[in-house]
Image (cartoon, helix red, strand yellow):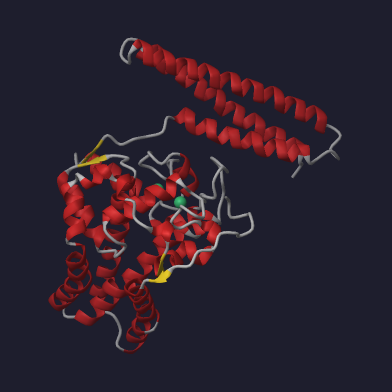
Amino acid sequence: MTHLEPKTFQEEGVRNWPVTLTLGLTFILGVTLVPWYGFTVGFSGWAWAFFGIFMLLTGIGIGSGYHRLWSHRTYVASPALQWFLAIVGGMSLQNSILIWSARHRVHHRDVDDDERDPYSIGRGFWFAHIGWMLKDYKSGEVDYSIVPDLKKNPVVMWQHKHYLELVLATNILLPLGLGFLVGDPIGVFLLAGVFRLVLNHHFTFFINSLAHMWGKQPYTDENSARDNWFLSIFTYGEGYHNFHHLFQNDYRNGVRWFAIDLNKWFIGMAAGMGMATDLRRTPQFKILRARLHMDFKRARERLETDPANPRWKELLDTLETEYAQYLGTIKEWQALQMEKVQQGKQKLADRLDASYRDLERALHLQRKRVAQLVAEAVPA
Ligand SMILES: [Zn+2]
Ligand SMILES: [Zn+2]
């Protein structure tokens, strides 16, 4: 079910008071007490500095840790990196790694299924953003059978067991302690503790709400996820959600080199330091194939609805010829994949690499031709 269809699924939930009060109170303090204190007393430079550092740490804890490491296993992290991510991720008060990842894996498996996806956008912006946490719904029940790997991970299980202590220590003791050291305990607590928590919450929540309704769909329209570079600025790359939903095993969400994806750079940097290995990347051919598939789909829609253009029939024919060629290229690629599996990797590696590159180039050129076709059909 997609969010475009009329809402039919209704479900009564029981109010979750601890979550409602925590999210409600921190939000109210964040938009009232924090600015009031800032205007009347003022924040020290230290308070702003810790605010910036904590924003960065919690964003990376969620993006590089909770999301890309534990939910999707897009790379392997050393124990030191795991401990770091478990602590700064826990600081963001978004539940333990185990629970967060279990729900997130279901979100990917059953995306847009209003009865199963814990934060399905089909149930509206508010529900996908925050409503799903404020009441206990059946769709939000944690299915631990989907995280057998994490149940065996000592860092994850330690964090799950000591989650409450970790949250209190990092959100109250740490900012107050650092604040005392620099002579501004209230300022550091309000900015780096409370205000940072509220911002990190809602920036993350925007991925479940806005990134499923606002933005482009360059890779797939089989689900509601969107690519949104603007959201990626605040979420350190998580806004490239259309790519992510199609290629969830890729450690990058912003796959192009210029895409703003701080988590991708962080993981790359950790790899450079030897703390992250086995970074998984989607083969370039698969990425191009997805983009071209969408290009064809849109070009066809454009041309078919443009019979006023005297050349539309001819353009449509050309498009179909291009499409047949595209399917041919895909077939060649599949044959190469088979060959690779049968022959073993090493023996034919060089020849295969060259063939893969040729096929990638073919798709790349074809994307240009399809774009040109569309441009001819609909003059700017
Ligand atoms: Zn994900
Ligand atoms: Zn999503």
- Residue at 27% over, 34% down: 278
- Residue 263, image x and y in percent? 34, 49
**The quadrant where residue 331 appears:** top right
User: Could you tell me residue 93's position as x and y percent?
Assistant: 29, 65
Numbered label tally: 0
* Above or below, comparing residue 267 to residue 206 in the picture: above
Q: Nearer the viewer, residue 48 or 4?
A: 4
Residue drawn at 56 percent across, 59 percent down: 9
Query: Residue 183 versus residue 346: which sits nearer the camera?
Result: 346
Q: Is residue 70 above or below residue 371?
A: below
Rendered image quadrant of residue 373? top right
Q: Is residue 239 left or right of residue 223?
A: left
Quick check: 69 above or below 137?
A: above
Residue 25 location in percent, x, y? Answer: 35, 79
Q: Position of residue 100 (x, y in %)?
A: 32, 55
Task: Compare residues 56 and 317 and report the one nearer the observer.
Answer: 317
Q: Is residue 176 left or right of residue 10?
A: left
Classify residue 344 by image quadrant. Answer: top left
Foreground residue, 265 or 145? 145
What's the residue at 49%, 19% (across, down)? 334
Q: Quadrant of the C terminus?
A: top right
In this picture, is 134 found above or below 219? below
For residue 151, say whether it is visible: yes
Residue 258 in view (yes/no): no
